[in-house]
Amino acid sequence: MSEIKALLFDVFGTVVNWRTSLIDNFTAWGAAKGFKSDWTALVDAWRGAYMPSMDEVRKHPERGFVILDDLQRQSIEPLAARLGITGLTPADFDYLTRGWHNLNPWPDSVGGLTRLKTKFIIGPLSNGNVALLTNMAKHAGLPWDLVLSAEIFQHYKPDREAYLGAAKILGLAPGQVMLVAAHNNDLAAAQSFGLKTAFVPRVTEYGPLQNRDFKADGNWDFVVKDFNDLADKLGC
């Protein structure tokens, strides 16, 4: 694997614990505001709207690319109404949307990334937009060398433009870049476009709703326990 020069990371679920972060944030915020709402149901429904909202962007290229912040903001109000969450103002919905900028890392993320950074270029390759990913890095202490986002390529993963665009912007061949992810489908797409792959399980990402990605389902280059295990295997 000596040809690998850069490690790119899926972020939501792989680097940060989005579900617990959002539920804890919204529960505390709601209590302070006097809202008694099922924030867990809202967070799970919101995540369920994630892929369909990006699919709409793919289906209608004539409308132009829409960043994830805007898609999340468009999704939240109808989801809240469906769940009977009332009394929220536009500013409240803006606050909830910004919650995605303030997600906490998994326990091994910062230490493992810091080790990997000593030998490789590291950065996200995420469907999050640049501002979201930058603010998240500040909040979580993620030591990225750069931020690569679907916004830059105007294509959401698993579109080929995201993976190959990332390699191109780094001045590297696809085989010199490895995607690290907790999601087998993301790795399958990356592998199909010539990138190396590493699977790290995050078996509590979806809490009790988790029904996939408990283990590696493909012939990935590395299958590791966490980022520190990956650093061990890569000699960092």
Image (cartoon, grey):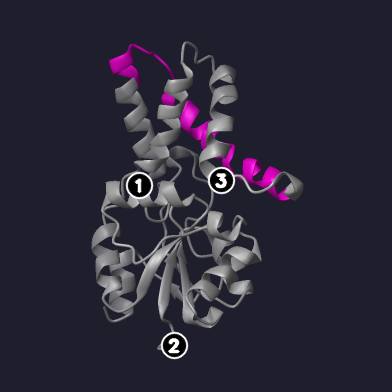
Badge 3: residue crowd in 10 Å (few <14, some 14–19, many ≥20): many
N-term-proximal mark, 2 vs 1: 2
As shown in the figure, which amino acid type bears the numbered disc 3?
Answer: Ile
Are dots 2 and 3 in contact, CB under 8 Å?
A: no
Number of marks in the rendered image:
3
Above or below residue 201? Residue 165 is below
Question: Residues in magenta?
Answer: 30-58
Above or below residue 225? Residue 11 is above
- Report which residue position mark 2 lands on: 3
Counting from the top left corner in percent of width and height, residue 234 is at 33, 80
As shown in the figure, which amino acid type bears the numbered disc 1?
Answer: Asn
Left or right, 121 with respect to 189, comes to: left
Tag 3, which secondary structure? loop
Counting from the top left corner in percent of width and height, residue 143 is at 28, 61
- Is residue 200 highlighted in magenta? no
Q: How far is the residue under mark 3 from the one under mark 1?
A: 15 Å
- Report which residue position mark 3 lands on: 67
For the stretch drawn in magenta, the main secondary structure is helix
